[in-house]
Amino acid sequence: MCVGAMRGFLTKEEKIEMLKEYKDSLEKEADGVEERIKELEKD
């Protein structure tokens, strides 16, 4: 979400939405890391 070009501020709702999307992204990355750890432990 690139709102910076339109205006110089984010509403509270936009900040919340951005943080939720960021959290989801981090959770998916953590899942991938956990999966990789399990793969390496099998070897």
Image (spheres, rainbow, N blue to C red):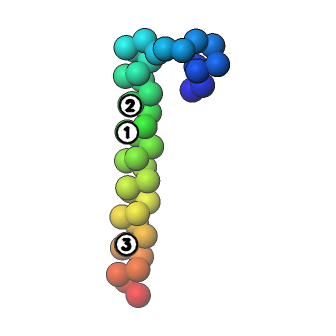
State the residue at coordinates (40%, 47%).
26
The residue wearing badge 3 is 37
Please identify the quarter of the rendering in which residue 8 is found: top right
Give the numbered dot on residue 13: none
State the residue at coordinates (41%, 87%).
43
Give the numbered dot on residue 23: 1
The picture places residue 1, in percent across and down from the top left corner, at: 57, 26
What's the amino acid at mark 1?
Lys
Q: Is mark 1 on a helix, strand or loop?
A: helix
**Mark 2 touches mark 1? (CB < 8 Å):** yes
Could you tell me how far apart the alpha carbons at marks 2 and 1 are, in whole angstroms? 5 Å
Neighbour tally class for label 2: few under 14, some 14-19, many 20 plus, Cα within 10 Å: few
Mark 3 or 1, which is nearer the eye?
A: 1
The residue wearing badge 2 is 20
What's the amino acid at mark 2?
Lys
**N-terminal of the two: label 3 or label 1?**
1
The picture places residue 23, in percent across and down from the top left corner, at: 37, 39
Is residue 1 or residue 7 the one in the foreground? 7
Neighbour tally class for label 3: few under 14, some 14-19, many 20 plus, Cα within 10 Å: few
Please identify the quarter of the rendering in which residue 16 is found: top left
Q: Give above or below for 19 relative to 40.
A: above
Could you tell me how far apart the alpha carbons at marks 2 and 3 are, in whole angstroms? 26 Å
State the residue at coordinates (43%, 12%).
11
What's the amino acid at mark 3?
Ile
Q: Is mark 3 on a helix, strand or loop?
A: helix
